[in-house]
Every structure is written in structure tokens, then in C-alpha cells.
Image: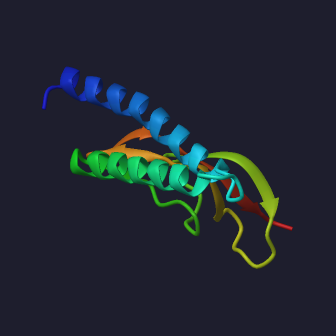
Amino acid sequence: MGKEVGRRLRDFFARFLLIQDDLGRALSCCAADTEGSEHLKEGIRLIHKRMEDLLAQQGVKRIEAVGTPFDPIYHEAVLMEEAPDVPENTVIEELEVGYLFQGILIRPAKVKVAKGT
């Protein structure tokens, strides 16, 4: 794959991931007690899953972050928090999913990292 094609694909996936993020946020905000909200939630979940599958088929992989050592190449530390039961510099929460396209970083995962006491 030529550099120009690779750059265009990465740019496309980066924009596509913004939609995926919005669907994920919409899914987490659906109120369970609103009439019809379960159907809405299920519909959003199915769209989110279908988009996730499409990305995977095209070689876009999620960066697994929680529980791994902080790596500035793949993670962007947004917050630090004391976590006595977790080794220092371990990712304890993922605030935004990071992705790779054929091993090339599309965007880093935004994470919360354990700091020493």
C-alpha cells in the first residue's frame, strides 16, 4: 500500500471513529426507565457492534489499555490517581478507546494512570 493511500485510510478511520465514539456515548446514556428506551438502546448497540465489526474487517484494532503498563506511544495520560492495589504507571481506566490500523497508530487511548503514593 502506498504512503498516500495509507495516510488517506488512517484519516478516514480517524473520522469514522468519532462516530463510533458518539454511538458508544449514546448507548451509555440511554435511560432504562424511559418508555421505548430499551429498544433504542438495543438499536444503538447493534449499530455500534456492526461498525466495530466493519473496522476489524478492515484491519483496525482496538488498543487494549486497562491493566497494562502506561506506554506514551499508545496511551495519552489524561488523569492520574492514587491506586494502592495497582502498580505505579498502570492504566486503571480507559476514557477514550485508542486504535491501530495494520499496526500503525490512528489515535492513542486516553487513559487514567495509577500514580505512586
- The number of numbered badges drawn on the structure is 0
Residue for point 70% across, 58% down = 113
Does the rendering let one see residue 101?
A: yes
Horizontal arrangement in the rendering, residue 9 relative to residue 67 (left or right): left
Horizontal arrangement in the rendering, residue 72 relative to residue 14 (left or right): right
The type of colouring in the image is rainbow
Residue 7: x, y in percent?
28, 25
**Quadrant including the C terminus:** bottom right
Instruction: Please name whichever residue, 43 or 76, is drawn nearer the observer in this view of the structure.
Output: 43
Horizontal arrangement in the rendering, residue 54 relative to residue 42 (left or right): left
Specify the farthest residue to the front. Answer: 35
Residue 70: x, y in percent?
59, 57
Residue for point 27% across, 46% down = 54
Specify the farthest residue to the top. Answer: 4
Specify the farthest residue to the left. Answer: 1
The relative height of residue 14 versus residue 85 in the rendered view (above or below) is above
Does the rendering let one see residue 108?
A: no
Residue for point 80% across, 59% down = 81
The relative height of residue 82 versus residue 102 in the rendered view (above or below) is below
Instruction: Please name whichever residue, 26 or 81, is drawn nearer the observer in this view of the structure.
Output: 26
**Quadrant including the N terminus:** top left
The relative height of residue 52 versus residue 19 in the rendered view (above or below) is below
Residue 98: x, y in percent?
48, 47
